[in-house]
Amino acid sequence: MPNDPLPVTGAWCPGDEPGCRRFHTFATEHPFAVESGAVLRDVVIAYETWGELNSDASNAILVCHAWTGDSHAAGRAGPGHPTPGWWDDCIGPGKHIDTNRWFVVCANVLGGCQGSTGPASPHPDDGLPYGSRFPVLTIRDMVRHQRRMMNHLGIERWRSVIGGSMGGMQVLEWAITYPERVGSIVPIASCMQSSAQQIAWGVIGRRAIRLDPRWRGGDYYGADPGDGPAEGLAIARQVAQVTFRSDNAFTDRFGRELTDRAQMGDTFGLWQEFEVERYLHYHGDKLVRRFDANSYLVIGKAMDLHDVARSRGSLESAMGRIRVPNLTIGINSDILYPPYQQRQMSRLLSRTGLPSTYIEIDSPHGHDAFLIHFDLVGEPIAKFLAAVG
């Protein structure tokens, strides 16, 4: 990693190189209300597209990103995009989600930090970052935000909505909240409502950020480089990173190896690092350079609040509103979103009588397998899209 000071925020800001992002601003005359009761004005949604929208706008697919993802689902790294698309092996000409046929859209979620309105964005009242003024959001708020982009693009109905992890939460909310605007769904490694254990992992990460004195209650954007809440955000990411992989993946890759046994000999130091420890430090610092601590908090809270049954009576009644073909994908080694959650989801979806398929990926990599085993995920998606197309 570079030796320069860690940034105060890794957020994309107006004036930065836009890369492939496009922007749509709404709520300029009437505010956009979120479930917490707050309202937002001059709301921006950053998105990217691949392929061509056909004449009747019937070939559009929405891909929803996970917690620390963004709109750059496909494409190379370059100006405005420090890393390649997170699903680049799946989206593109001749790939599993074939952009020779499909018009693919991916948006940065509301509350994100890569172009859409979020805590690092300028507040319309004073031009300073929202910081602590940014409201609590839900997954439903994110979906309503995306619907404004859908209208802007002239799309009446998504042929399919696809997403993994938090993206899968958005998939379900799209199909429940706007059933007439979704033609099929593919939720991957996700859930209908966050479990107590999933919430517990999120609580630990949020506490790590809150206890970082450089977080400053959420108003840290004016600090000098190296004086932001990097430590808290890095620890939060390290905690999450443990849940993204399986025990076998960690054991096979790192075992119990120490990083500096050659120098230490047979002695041990309190802060002598294990190889897995160095791996976690790397991923913590890596996220700090491309993400924002407040966005991490806001999005993580939205995931913990996720419950499709909220204000809808029950899981059965909520899921009963989904009446489209569906493909649910689980991962056998996933400890964060265990496959029993996807099996339960698929059982409820199958009650509609419409085509419902459940596939469980055999992978040692845990939750992140949907971002690693592109063929195992992409091939059933391609087959499903061919069937619903």
Image (cartoon, rainbow, N blue to C red):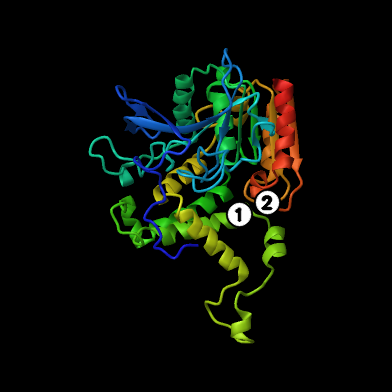
Task: Please tell me whether mark 2 sits on a helix, a strand or a loop.
Answer: helix
- Where is residue 273 drawn, in percent x and y? 57, 73
| Three-letter amino acid code of the residue under disc 1 | Thr
| Picture quadrant where residue 110 is located | top left
| Three-letter amino acid code of the residue under disc 2 | Gly
Question: Left or right: where does residue 206 sit relative to residue 106?
Answer: left
Looking at this view, name the residue that lies furthest to the bottom: 266
- The circle on residue 243 is 1
Crowding at dot 2, Cα within 10 Å, few <14 / some 14-19 / many 20+, comes out as many
| Picture quadrant where residue 326 is located | top right
Could you tell me which residue is drawn at 65 percent across and 31 percent down? 93
Viewer-side residue, 349 vs 267: 267
Can residue 369 be seen? yes
- The circle on residue 366 is 2
| Sooner in the amino-acid sequence: mark 2 or mark 1 | 1
**Residue 298 higher or lower than 307, as above or below:** below
Could you tell me which residue is drawn at 48 percent across and 36 percent down? 20
| Picture quadrant where residue 348 is located | top right
- Where is residue 67 drawn, in percent x and y? 52, 44
- Where is residue 288 drawn, in percent x and y? 45, 55
- Where is residue 260 drawn, in percent x and y? 60, 78
Number of numbered markers = 2
Viewer-side residue, 170 vs 37: 170
Discs 2, 1 touching: Cβ within 8 Å: yes
